[in-house]
Amino acid sequence: MIPPIVRTLPALRKATRNWHAQGDTIGVVPTMGALHDGHLSLVAAAKAACDRVIVTIFVNPKQFNQAADLAAYPRTEEADARKLERFAVDAVYAPDITQIYPEGFATNVSVTGMTDVLCGAHRPGHFDGVATVVTKLFTQTSADKAFFGEKDFQQLMVVQRMARDLDLPVDVIGCPTIREEDGLAMSSRNLLLSDRARVKAQHLSEVMTEVAGQLAQGVPFANVQADAVTKLDLAGFTSVDYFELRACTDLKLLDQPTEPARLFAAAWLAGVRLIDNIDVPVAR
Ligand code: AMP
């Protein structure tokens, strides 16, 4: 059965109150739609861990810092609902904008520190938009568990910090990045790539994997960073927002993976901003 699409908060609350009254746990998978197998892996994780699962679809204007990016964002709601059919999801919450930002809405949830770097530095206001909407989605769905992808690792950290700091009664769970066969991390934005650009896109994960291998052999990051950026330039990326090695715990810059670390990259290809991050084994 195609899951019911719920558009209003009162209708959502009616369902969630019943579920909690029956003693059912609720899992939520927040998305902006244009669902792919990465999203669906979160839905599968939620189904395995919770009695009831809500997938939210909301293209959140507050987290876009460019109007053109918001306008171009793919919207495929009907196909999304069909993709969720086989998971027996209990509800798709696709709220009208007034359910999230009613007239006069004046509150901002802002996580400091870890949002100063990476995407936070390049997309001003982005993580305030994320933290604000996710706070609302958590309180609106009254979810016990929430599932986020490591694909957006900084976002996962921001949401975990925010939930802890605000004592939100929800367990925020990170799930591994799902990739295409050629290594490209799945993303709704990949739909915006032409066939030619799509072929070039694989170089992002390719270069990252190569650098991770060099780091594992003890090569300092400073020795390989510039080369990696040049490789992306040559592969057709028009600019690289960042290509950095950072600690998993607090996102501080590292030159060697002396503690749990990840390589983080964001780069532009044919007008589309692609991001990725991969685990780097701790050097002995
Ligand atoms: P989005 O619709 O892009 O806002 O993503 C919704 C959720 O799906 C976020 O928690 C993302 O981190 C997660 N996600 C997106 N792409 C992937 C992927 N390739 N693998 C795993 N999770 C993903």
Image: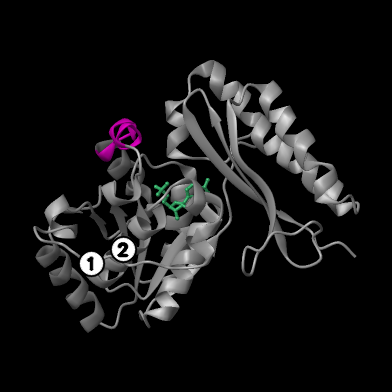
Residue receiving disc 1: 107
The amino acid beneath tag 1 is: Thr
Which residue sits at x=37%, y=49%? 86
Residue 74 in which image quadrant:
top left
The amino acid beneath tag 2 is: Thr
Q: Is residue 196 magenta?
A: no
Percent position (x, y) of residue 263?
69, 51
* Element carrying mark 1: loop
Mark 2 C-beta to ligand 1 under 8 Å: no
Q: Going from the N terminus, do you reach mark 1 or mark 2 first?
A: 1
Percent position (x, y) of residue 254?
75, 59
- Residue 132's label in the rendered image is 2
Q: Residues within 10 Å of mark 2 (few under 14, many from 20)?
A: many
* Element carrying mark 2: helix
Q: Nearer the viewer, residue 101 or 121?
A: 121
Segment colored magenta: 67-77
84 vs 113: above or below:
above
Percent position (x, y) of residue 37?
48, 44
- Residue 276's label in the rendered image is none
- Horizontally, residue 14 falls left or right of residue 268, namely left
269 vs 208: above or below:
above
